[in-house]
Image (cartoon, rainbow, N blue to C red):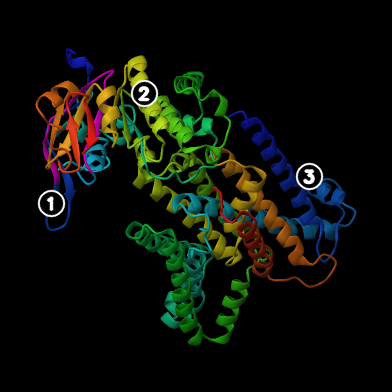
Amino acid sequence: MLNQKKYTLAIILLFLAVVVTALLNISLGSVNIPIQEVASSLFGFKVEKDTWRYIILNYRLPKAITAIITGSGLAVSGLLMQTLFRNPLAGPYVLGLSSGASLGVAIVFMGASLFGASFAGILLSEWSLVVASSLGSLMVLFAVILASIRLRDTMAILIIGLMFASLTAAIVSVLAYFSPASKLQQYVFWSYGSLGDLSWDEVLILGLFWFVGILISIGSIKNLNSLLLGEHYARSLGTNIKKNRFMIIIATSLLAGSITAFAGPIAFVGLAVPHLIRQIIPSANHITLVPAVIFGGAILMLICDIIAQLPGSEFSLPINAITSIIGAPVVIWLLVRKRKFNF
Amino acid sequence: MSSKNSNKVLKTEDLTIGYKKKSHREIVASGINIEINAGELVAVIGVNGSGKSTLLKTLSGIIQNIDGEIFISNNSLLNTTPDKLSKYISLVLTEQLLSKNLSVIELIALGRQPYTNWIGSLTKRDLKQIMYAIQLVNIEEIKNKKCHELSDGQFQKVLIARALAQDTPLIILDEPTTHLDLYHKAYVLKLLQKLSRETNKAILFASHEINLALQLCDKLVILKDKTALFGTPAELIENGALNDLFPKELIQFDSKTSSFKIK
């Protein structure tokens, strides 16, 4: 409680860091635009070159917003999973949520041609991608929950997540085998992950899903805290365990599903950010952790995107590769250093 | 002690406890009639596997009873929702916490959840109750430590403070003295006695510390041969309920000193 003030300060600093990295993210790229120019074009002042304004408003700004949504959404769903499953290694990617979402997306991209043209019309709108992907992750999450009720062993749950990942990967390869090359290519590019290809309309749809998911997460803060004591204690404190579990599942599916649909399967952010935040803010209280993780996820994603853009060069790398290259060593480092994860 | 109706914190009528399985019901104990009033310290005693945990879990609503009735502050447990029950019963369990990264004061503050708003912010009244709980169990000097920095004895006191902060007429503790040395065992049970007197709360706990319980408790529940005996220590000693609690060839009850001796 006494630390709360210190934590509030840390959260404010994290927020400022989001603003700074976002500006940096917009300014850096194949063409580097000075930060002042970025700020003036964002606030509608005069900009030196009109092309800069065009690049910023139609390309870089939606990309930066997507990065913020993606990073914060995945990080929050990772935090929710870790508390719900009582497992520090849980996260949307590890538990197979992203693979479930991939399956949904694969069916939309490649199934359309298999199931006939009339079906394809329904399947290939912007919304269908989000819905299919959210349904995919929801399906996997329900399966994991069912398994977790039967198996108290948390390691088993992770292994089940891995099994789901390979199962969905197998179904995806079967679909891929029968698909025309153009559809397959569409899917492969999607699976590299990308923050940059979204139109403002798509950003809006993604933002809507994100908003609902984050809202439910914030509403679950009190119950998440009671879950820190274990389920029996939580119930004795008046927590409705089943309803609470349901709400958390819905929130994570909306977040992980919609993000995966638009930005591709992005690894490690969900798992790593909550742990990185706990290094800075050694609190278990979700009233501190949820906002800190939201900002932390956004910062990490913005930085990963800056790296992926290879500022000054004309190339860019797949974002999924960058998050893995940064995320995997971070998790290993945490494990080796601490030996045991602290919640 | 006279039992006025308003004082009655917990009452069971012909309670049968056990586990419902698909094909059959496994009965652990039946014919349990106990009555606990405000301000009383009551121990549940019995050998391993006699059903102490099952009884406490049933009384706290974690598992359902098979037969009979349970009344918590004159309300049937069956009709009490978890959020309502959280204002009647607080628990101290043996299960591991998910997180020991909470500070002592944060953990105790979680005891106020039944009273806080949707996001769990603490009012002045909540803070007052938390400070009162901390002062009652005398843990002021460790209140800002993290839970993983505490010894088993200190942690047990923190859990008790959390239950006190929940401010319920009944506190149920499952084996609060395991993992503790003899001094801390006596200390914790003595603390429970003090708390029951000072706060007028009913405290029910399961324990293997029969000798200590006989000296400190107002009443005992003895689980034996799939049923329960209930009464004051003096009553139970008088009607010989303790004599065959353990196999006689090894441990015997000495009614003169009111304690168990190895033969």
Quadrant of the snapshot with the N terminus of chain B: top left
Q: Which residue is mark 1?
A: B25
Residue at the spot of label 3: A43
Q: Nearer the viewer, residue A213 or A284?
A: A284
What amino acid does circle 3 point to?
A: Phe
Q: Residue furthest front?
A: B263
Chain at numbered mark 2? B
Judge left or right: residue B30 versus residue A25: left
Identify the chain of the residue marked 1, using the numbered disc in the image.
B
- Main secondary-structure element of the magenta-colored stretch: strand
Q: CA distance from mark 2 to mark 1?
A: 38 Å
Q: Is residue A62 visible?
A: no
- Which chain letter goes with mark 3? A
Q: Is residue A301 above or below residue B225?
A: below
- Say which element carries label 2: helix
Query: In the figure, A260 relative to B69: above or below?
Result: below
Question: Quadrant location of residue A160?
Answer: bottom left
- Magenta stretch, residue numbers: B28-47
Query: Mark 2 — residue?
Result: B190
Residue type beneath disc 1: Arg
Which percent across, then down, holds residue A208? 55, 51
Residue drawn at x 36%, y 23% is B190
Count of picture labels: 3
